[in-house]
Amino acid sequence: MIAEYNRLGKHMPPNQFDLSWENFRSIVVPMPSIVDQWRIANFLDAETSRLDQLSRLRLTQLPLLTERGQREKLSQIEGYEPTWLELRRAGARVTTGPFGTALSAAEYVHGAVPVINPTHIKDSRINPSLSETVPPEVAIRLRRHMLRAGDMVVGRKGDIGRSALVNSDQDGWICGSDSIAIHFDQSRLSPAYIAHVLSIDSVREQLLARSVTATMPSLSEGNLLSLRIPYLDMQLQRKLVGKFDTDGEHVTSLSVSMSRQADVLTERRQALITAAVTGQLDVTTARSGVRV
């Protein structure tokens, strides 16, 4: 069908058509009898409904996987009877990114030292923008706001608590004005452990409860330092990080598998429609029901 569109539509790309009404009227389409049209329509209504239901089921299972993982994570932490401490009492320090006259929009260049704001944090990873960077001399001027390997950068506006660890390749990047950097006393706190703790919604909700919500949720250094975390000794923190990492890989694998299944169901739905309306599938003999 797309080939027919392209033949009549000036050979434009498949997602761009410049088709006149006259050309549209001349497109050749399969035209079975009215009885067969109804038979095909009824068959497709039933089969695509089943496929859509399966696809929705796969997609609704994805957040349930995440929710279950969070519950198990918190349960394992609480099994060691942690002491709930404010971050400040666990030896953490924080630094807010530069704002106001400290860094102007005119100082941004392309492809230099990245400035990290919440929009650059996705799935607990930092994904910098090449267009939001500053020259090395500006980065040196802003060294107070530099991120160091082992720090955590946390969103302080909008999506409160969106966070990611800073790895060795990101050492020296700049904490943006809408972010706060957490610096850890690594003799007392494992950054990886805190990263897992902050991935738990019930912990992140503390941040939202403490935020200022005049127009947009906003988090201050004091509010972040008052966040209560389940504190354990370093040996237990490291042990749990290993367990959480392994469990996380399993959940990620399941999530990827479910997403692929949903994609396959979508492709199968389209293939089924194409086969039925073009006569490749005889709906009078096709078995009812869809198996995945």
Image: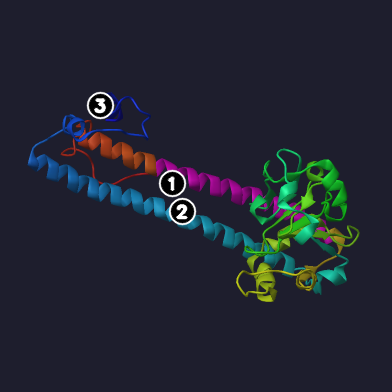
Tell me which label, 2 or 3, sits earlier in the chain.
Answer: 3
Q: Earlier in the sequence, mark 1 or mark 2?
A: 2
Amino acid residing under circle 2: Leu
| Mark sitting on residue 59 | 2
Front one among 132 and 48: 132
User: Residue pushed farthest right?
Assistant: 187
The range drawn in magenta is: 236-265
Q: Is residue 217 visible?
A: yes
Q: Quadrant of the C terminus?
A: top left
Q: Nearer the viewer, mark 2 or mark 3?
A: 3
Q: Quadrant of residue 111?
A: top right
Q: Nearer the viewer, residue 78 or 34?
A: 34
Residue assigned mark 1: 262
Question: In this rendering, would 291 be left or right of 179?
Answer: left
Residue at mark 3: 8
Give amino acid for label 3.
Leu
Q: Position of residue 26 (x, y in %)?
A: 16, 29
| Residue 231 left/right relative to 261 | right
Is residue 214 covered in magenta? no
Work out whether residue 239 or residue 179 is closer to the camera in this orientation and state it.
Answer: 179
Q: Residue at x 68, y 69 (%)?
A: 218
**Which residue is located at x 38 percent, y 39 percent?**
267
Q: Find residue 14 and name its label.
A: none
Pointer 1 with pointer 3, Cβ within 8 A: no
